[in-house]
Amino acid sequence: MKKKMLILPALMSIMALFLSGCEPLMIFDPKGPNAKTLSNTIILSIIVMAVILLVVYVLLVTMLMKYRASKSPSDYEPPHEEGSTKLEIIWTVIPILIVTALSIVTISTTSKVESQQTGYDNTKPLVIYAASSNWKWHFSYPEEGVETVNYVNIPTDRPIEFRLYSFGPITSFWIPQLAGQKYAMSDMVNKIHMAADVEGSFFGRNSNFNGKGFAQMEFEAQTMSQQKFDEWVSDVKAKEPELTEKTFNELLDTDFVGRKSFSSTHLTFSPAPEMHHGKSSDMSDDAEEMDGMDMSDGEMDHSNH
């Protein structure tokens, strides 16, 4: 019995040892309003579950101690006890109330993070197309006319709208300290909103296991002031080559590449699914973005068919 009692502390010590290398856990160190909302919801859920476990374990120990077997006479017959309607109602209603409360919090949180960041109502969001391919990330800035591979720069104190899709299997875009995860698929565009409160370098990755190169689908998300961001865009336009269709196809066919920058985007010759099919409710926004890429009228007509 004593050996069994030592198993739980030993397992907890091992888990603590492994988790010590992950300190601090990124989801509990948010650097943006979206991430903070999600972190608070996760913490609340953990607290509720911890309280439930505490109550259950206290009741378990109490029952084991109070109603454990005793040295009663062999002819002892325990008294017959009727069930308690009051207790039945209590332990039925309590779980319903807990689940209802957590559901309300979850729905509220989901609605909040799916919308543009609060506090930026009069600020136009920066739109970035994030496209995945085996095994890399392509970030296209239609308004700025630049594109990067395996890293993304964003300005602080400005709403960011990532538009996600994939050139291969389903992936999941995730920057834990800035927002939650959302899937990128081949024939549609999903959106994820975020904003950064501070400047810094943050870890991003594909959180959906989708094959042999899954572990290498990581990228850096660097946040900077609007001035530094504008300087970076100007620097890329001045020093980096344009992205041609041939170069882009070579990138798609190459499994692993490093960080790359280009002074144009692949959206001019390989538009996102929402632009290609013309089914998105944001087509007017896309048209404005494409105008900023100096496209000809013929190219624009082709992108909307």
Image: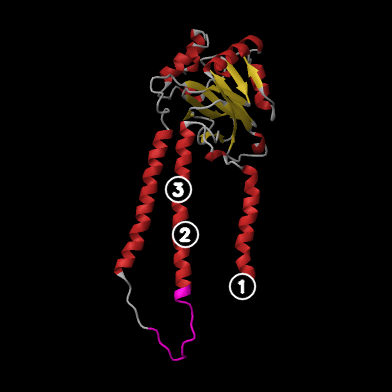
Q: Earlier in the sequence, mark 3 or mark 1?
A: 1
Residue at 45%, 37% in the rendered image: 37
Q: Which residues are magenta?
A: 65-78
Is residue 265 visible to the viewer in this orientation of the structure?
no
- Quarter of the image holding residue 242? top right
- Between 208 and 9, the one lying in front of the other is 9
Amino acid type at image mark 3: Ser
**Label 2 to label 3: alpha-carbon separation:** 14 Å
SS class, disc 2: helix
For disc 2, the marked residue is 54
SS class, disc 3: helix
- Between 91 and 141, the one lying in front of the other is 91
Q: How many marks are shown on the rendered structure? A: 3
Amino acid type at image mark 1: Met
| Relative to 13, residue 229 above or below | above
For disc 3, the marked residue is 45
Would you say the residues marked 2 and 1 are in contact, meaning their CB atoms lie under 8 Å apart? no
**Residue 230 is covered by the magenta coloring:** no
Label ID, residue 1: 1
Is residue 187 visible to the viewer in this orientation of the structure?
yes
Label ID, residue 101: none
Pointer 1 local density, CA inside 10 Å: few below 14, some 14–19, many at least 20: few
Query: Nearer the viewer's eye, disc 2 or disc 3?
Result: 2
SS class, disc 1: loop
**Residue 71 is covered by the magenta coloring:** yes
- Between 187 and 66, the one lying in front of the other is 66
